[in-house]
Image: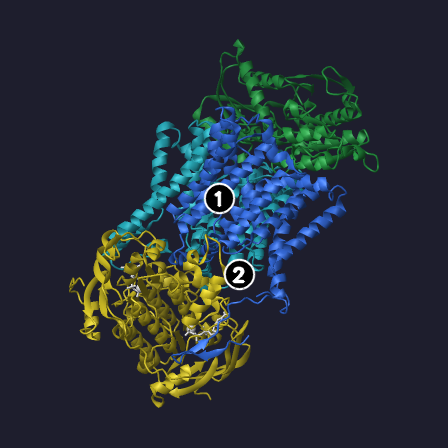
Amino acid sequence: MPESAIENTPQVETKEVKVSKLAGIYKFRELGLLGFIIILSILIQLRNPSFLSIENINDMVTNTAILSILALGMMLILITRGIDLSIGSTIAISGMLVAQTVSTYQHLNPFVVILLGTVIGMVCGAVNGFLISKWGLLPIIATLAMMNIFRGITYKISGGEWISSYQMPEGFVSIATGKTLGINNLIVIAIIIYLLIYYMINHTRTGRQIYAVGSNPDSAKVSGIKEGRILMLVYTVMGGLAGLSGVLWVSKFASAQGDTASGYELTVIAACILGGVSIAGGSGKIAGVILGSVLIGILNNALPLLNVSPFWQTGIQGSIILVAVIVNTLVKRGVDRNNLMRRKI
Amino acid sequence: ACTQGAPQSSSSTDDQGSEDTEGKKKYAMVFKNTGNPYGEKMMDGFKEAVEAIGGEVILRSPDQPTAEGQIQIIEQLITQKVAAIAIAGNDQDALEPVLKKAMDQGIKVLSVDSAVNANSRILHVNQANPERIGRIQIEAVSEMIGGEGQIAILSATSQATNQNLWIEWMKKELEDPKYANIELVKVAYGDDLRDKSVSETEALLKSYPDLKGIIAPTTVGIAAAGKVITDKGLNGKVAVTGLGLPSEMASYIESGVSPWMYLWNPIDVGKVAGYTAHALVEGTITGELGETFEAGDQGSLEIVEDGDGTQIMLGDPFKFDASNIAEWKDVY
Amino acid sequence: MEPQTLLDDNGYLKRNIIDKKEFSLKTFFLQWEWMLVIILLAVIVINSLLSPYFLNYPSLRDGTVTFLDKAFIVFPMAMVMILRDIDISVGSTVALSSVVMATMYNSLGVPMELAIIICLAVGALCGLINGLLIVKFKELSAVIVTLGTMILYRGIAYVILEDQSSGNFPEWFGFFGWGYVFGIPFILILFIIVAVIFGIVLHKTTFGRQIFAMGKNPTASRFSGVKVDKIKIIVFTLAGLMAGVTALFLASRMGSTRPNVANMYELDVIAMAALGGISTAGGKGKILGTVIAVFIIGYLQYGLGLINIPAQTLLIIVGALLIFAVTVPKIKLPSFIRRK
Amino acid sequence: MTNYVLELRGITKEFPGVKALDNVHFKLKAGEIHALMGENGAGKSTFIKVITGVHQPNSGEMFLNGEKIEFTNPKDAEKMGIAAIYQHVTNYPDLSVTENIFMGHEKVHPFTKKIRWKEMHAEARKILEELGSKIDPKIEMGTLSVAQQQIVEIAKAISTNAKIIIMDEPTAALTARESEELYKITERLRDQGASIIFISHRFEDMYRLASQVTVFRDSKYIGSWGVNEITNDKLIVAMVGREITQVFPKKKNQVGEKLLEVKNIGKIGYFADISFSLKKGEILGLTGLVGAGRTEVCQSLFGITSYDRGEVFLKDQKISLKDPKTAMNLGIGYLAEDRQLQGLVLDWGIGRNITLPALEELSTKGWLNDKKESAIAKKLAEKVNVKANSIFDLVSSLSGGNQQKVAVAKLLTADLDVIILDEPTKGVDVGAKSAIYEIINDLATQGYGVIMVSSEMPEILGMSDRIIVMREGRITRILDKEEATQEKILEAAMSEVIENQVG
Ligand SMILES: Nc1ncnc2c1ncn2[C@@H]1O[C@H](COP(=O)(O)OP(=O)(O)OP(=O)(O)O)[C@@H](O)[C@H]1O
Ligand SMILES: Nc1ncnc2c1ncn2[C@@H]1O[C@H](COP(=O)(O)OP(=O)(O)OP(=O)(O)O)[C@@H](O)[C@H]1O
Ligand SMILES: [Mg+2]
Ligand SMILES: [Mg+2]
């Protein structure tokens, strides 16, 4: 649903605008999640006042930037009824290759480096896309297999070695630590990605076709939408974003390892589903996915701050994720029920 | 008809074929996981030693650091009738049954780097005395922060036995009155994940604004701490030390974020493991307390006590600082 | 065959609709399971050529034991996948149930026999909770629910055992993972029994038929009076129960357990089921196929381990095999042997 | 030759094992409405899909304005000005109505290619209003009822400004009033110069609209006539290959004692104050406009959804309907409105579909009994006269009408008292329709109580003993057979007055 797009194009009559705005709020399906995040933040703030300090918020947002970039890519894939389990490995392979490159060619322009990583990722994504669209493999199987393969290749090309910070030129490390207009580059890059994807999925034909393919693949075929092309596109985009994230990851942590981001795909998927993206395809919105990433970011940031015993952290994280999705569901149900009550019979 | 342990028909298969056609004995090393430069170096050392004594070397590690993966590998090594297995265990206890099986079939089992329990090995090759490792880091951090202030520890996972043991010793050392002004505020766990270690370090800095020092006895943790301190411009305010790979820490040691830190030489550890395995296979030693043997270029070694079992103890960890890091960072 | 047309009493056209399936050699031999058999034989032959240690009874026997523990979960996972769902919490369920069992025995003095039953019960309970949540909150899919419980169950295991491992089981408990009956590993015997039971349930009972129906069209199944919720709950409970069984074997093989065991088992299990011909798109698959697939992956890993292939190469090979095996049936065969 | 905008010659299309089209011809003149008729499975839908490039024919040629053309995918056809409304609704449930209408030909800015949402919404609203519908173009398609979705499909075809519009049973889900709207639109399109191919099983559609009619039977071309040149009887013979003397069977059913009593049931947002009773052997017609809530009422009587208030009694016993299985065990059966989604497992054979509701009865202690199952499936498939070779034929390979017969056969497996049929003859040809009527009548005669939901006036009038009319979730009138007329029903379906008659 291009609801956000609708809200951007105000109606002719002001009265109608009011009504549709109100309806817009009711229609905002992630209301429960937003409320949950706010309440959670207040509770954390009460226990540790440094939680909502500028510095901590900045750290939190910076640490969440990569996750949210990946989650947007994953959203596109989930919309087409797919899934990509290989992104952790793609991050590793792109990070490793890029780190090896910059350690050899110290004076490479950062933009070239970013581009290189993105292209490496796109190649990985294209392999997934090819297997899925051309060979008709199920996404979960194809990407599970490629997860193993990319990871294996990463170990092979690294020969078990890591690329450490002393081998990385300053220019490369500053991709993630530098600032543009006073804002951390990671955040800037993430915002650019949000805007690009927002524009793509709400204002271009191709973007809408992604939803169409997920909503009903059969009728997409009848409408002449080339499903294969769309699948190829989303997996390549996901790969590209994972490749980009690989560069950012390695730059941020100033180290490239073979086991970088192992298992990270599940965190990314968790962010998407917290954000209300349906695994069954066809629906998912940027705002929701960003909220989902934020919730995970808050958990990662706050659990250490709250001095929670390390043995309780996993359990608390699991319960909060479960409670969040359940609360969100209940609120959605409530909203729907409210809408029904107001329907005249 | 129900039996436990391999049935008779096969339990005696080892006698006819423990020697390969070429007559070379097989020495296997199993590390925690693949793609770990520390492990790769240790395996390099092991390989060097085995080749020096004229054996055939097998180097294995599972792709994830799990005991389950190591069990599978050990079963495969038993089937191949290796002469000795040197293992860096992912779990102290979980390998006991399979390593016992190996020993029952005449395979000499030793642990190296991270020990398995005394029942499941003949002896352990200890890279450094845990007591010394623990105490030395407190001494170091105390020196760095001028003997007073808050310190924190950033460890690997909460169940990493090595780290936990060292942390125990750190706490013991802290009981010494000369550290009366040093307060250990928290032990955090970064799970050897970059992102988590960074979050934990950031949380430490925020929760304890007066923090003076961080000890991270784990490679990923110390590098992540170094990175966060560097990025936040806290160089000089918060000191980082601990155990880490010189290559990973070179920038931070050179910049002074971490004035110095420690580690042993994994290549040497691997070599000692190789020679020890050879001595066990040849029967030069049986793993009893007090035995000594010649370990190639590593000199003469003695078997000492270790709780219920025995071990070979290498020297103190090596100190890496600005003066020597440049020559080591390319080595490992 | 031409349908016969005739007129019934009212003068309507009446058809004779055939109700016997003709046995066709072609369809019989085009079954996916043959493909798997061929792959399995290939794996065995290649392994025997590569390693002198592979092809003898003790080696095969001990090799089998190394990979069978998680294979118990493949069967209920096949059912879950046929229902178009997925359960990614099984690894954590293994950890939790084994940790509870060990704690019961070591810290609370519960007799081991009872602790074993508790282990199975905890597994089943975890599955039941998954099932109930999935049924109560239909808007959430199984992935979401089990992703949450995956983290939660392991979290509980950490809370219980913290950084400790817990073992010291009685001697006889080792029998599960290391015992033999008439020279055959106990785990293999039990595996085959469980496989047969699941095969019968899935292919020969109304329950199984209804699972397939739900996988193909859940709405129509509900409209046809299939108790979709009940079936879902049962299937997820079975997944938990089998995770409990795996927990027993794993704990027995390791002589102890810890909260971090069985990490990512779910992905291995899903890969085995997928190779076995269970489609994650639902409604399709056979237990026989999954059994063969378990042995293919297991022997492949074991055999390559015997020639000491590095783990990273193994990752690539298993990944490639998965793609190869799933792709082959999609390759357009010449029309005279193409399957319908 | 050139006065034909579209001409197809010698088209043959084979599916594995079925020849769906066998050397058929077709000629469409400019500005004509051309009806295409034939029994279920005659090949009409397949023919349409050949025209629009969804299927490629095995042999044959196609000419557009005298020029030979070949389409490899539906996009080609759309570019050449051919639009189709397919028989089985093909929409995007998660997308807005506007997007559904414009999918594939969105309005975009010529340079930036940015989608012009504002214009599209406005245009969608306009088209829908022209169609006499108040559907909000921004609403999600999935929230609409089947009939509303059908209207959107029509809007979609109109929006492409196509020169040739093909409608495959567009009226199957529409009521008389909506059909009338559709006729007007179709005529207007024709007057604007479009040529239209119209497929329907309803004769009134053809008489009202078409000037030419072409008939297929058993995949073959039978003939093409001017609508005025051919009599109804001859047309039926052409279609069915035999005479059908009477569409509605003579009623033999005896209305007996009370079976089902519904007291004031309601469900928030869907329906309220629904009360009626059903007697043994009675056929109770339930009619109303699109979205009147008939389906919701029926489904809550079958335990699919629940009602929030009110009570239901079966044979004077208060019953609670938790789920469909409970309803079936109590003796209530339901034929779903949307056979593809709710009725059938399309990827399964006919036999398995038929026996699915009765698996427990056909099995011994949970064990499947293949022999018994096959025998029952065969008997029932033959009883409803499915056009198929064997019970192992996949339901997805059957034509729409034959799929419906399979769905009906499923009901006959269970031991029921009350049978609820939701649009049982939707998309079913005359021959099969009368067979289904025959079955319904038989059921009533045997003492079943039958509730028949239908939007077709003749069917409601011809079959029912009593008629319930619903409007916006409430019962507005309950009419006896004798007093019922088309006018009264329409009035009740559309008027504001609520007469709360409890039957
Ligand atoms: N994809 C397919 N695969 C196999 N057979 C098919 C397929 N599509 C249609 N058929 C067969 O082609 C024949 C013609 O079907 P079609 O749907 O064109 O009939 P129809 O005239 O539209 O009938 P109805 O009025 O019931 O919709 C039927 O026998 C059907 O079983
Ligand atoms: N105002 C409305 N807004 C959205 N949806 C509505 C509205 N009114 C009715 N509906 C839809 O219509 C359905 C109720 O109509 P239902 O399908 O039960 O009617 P029906 O009389 O059976 O009509 P049909 O001919 O479509 O089968 C609801 O499920 C709902 O989705
Ligand atoms: Mg048709
Ligand atoms: Mg209806």
Q: Which residue is located at x 29 percent, y 72 percent?
A: D456
Q: Nearer the viewer, residue D192 or A270?
A: A270
Q: Identify the hue of chain A.
A: cyan
Color used for chain C?
Answer: blue
Residue at x 17% of width, y 65% of height: D496
Q: CA distance from mark 2 to mark 1?
A: 37 Å
Q: Position of residue D30 (x, y in %)?
A: 40, 84
Chain bearing mark 2: A
Q: Quadrant of residue A39?
A: top left
Res A85 visible: no
Can you give x and y, in whole percent of width and height, for residue D318 in the image? 24, 53
Q: Is residue B1 visible?
A: yes
- Tell me if residue D159 comes above or below residue C306 in the rendering: below
Question: What number is the disc on residue B258?
Answer: none
Render colour scheme: by chain
In this rendering, the answer to whether C212 lies above or below B278 is below
Tell which residue pokes out farthest to the right in this image: B22
Crowding at label 1, few (<14), some or many (≥20) Cα neighbours within 10 Å? many
Give the residue number, with chain letter if any, for mark 2.
A228
Task: Name the amino acid type tagged 2.
Answer: Gly
Instruction: Examine the image and state in which quarter residue B113 appears.
Output: top right
Q: Residue furthest bottom?
A: D229
Question: Looking at the image, is mark 2 or mark 1 nearer the viewer?
Answer: 1
Q: Colour of chain B?
A: green
Residue placed furthest toward the top: B177
Seen in the picture, residue D36 relative to A279 is either above or below; the reply is below
In the rendered image, the vertical position of residue A3 relative to residue C244, given as above or below: below
Query: Is residue D31 left or right of A138 when viewed as pictured?
Result: left
* Quadrant placement of the N terminus of chain A: bottom left
Please report the residue visible at 32 percent of the width from the left and 45 percent of the height from the top: A331
Q: Which chain is yellow?
A: D
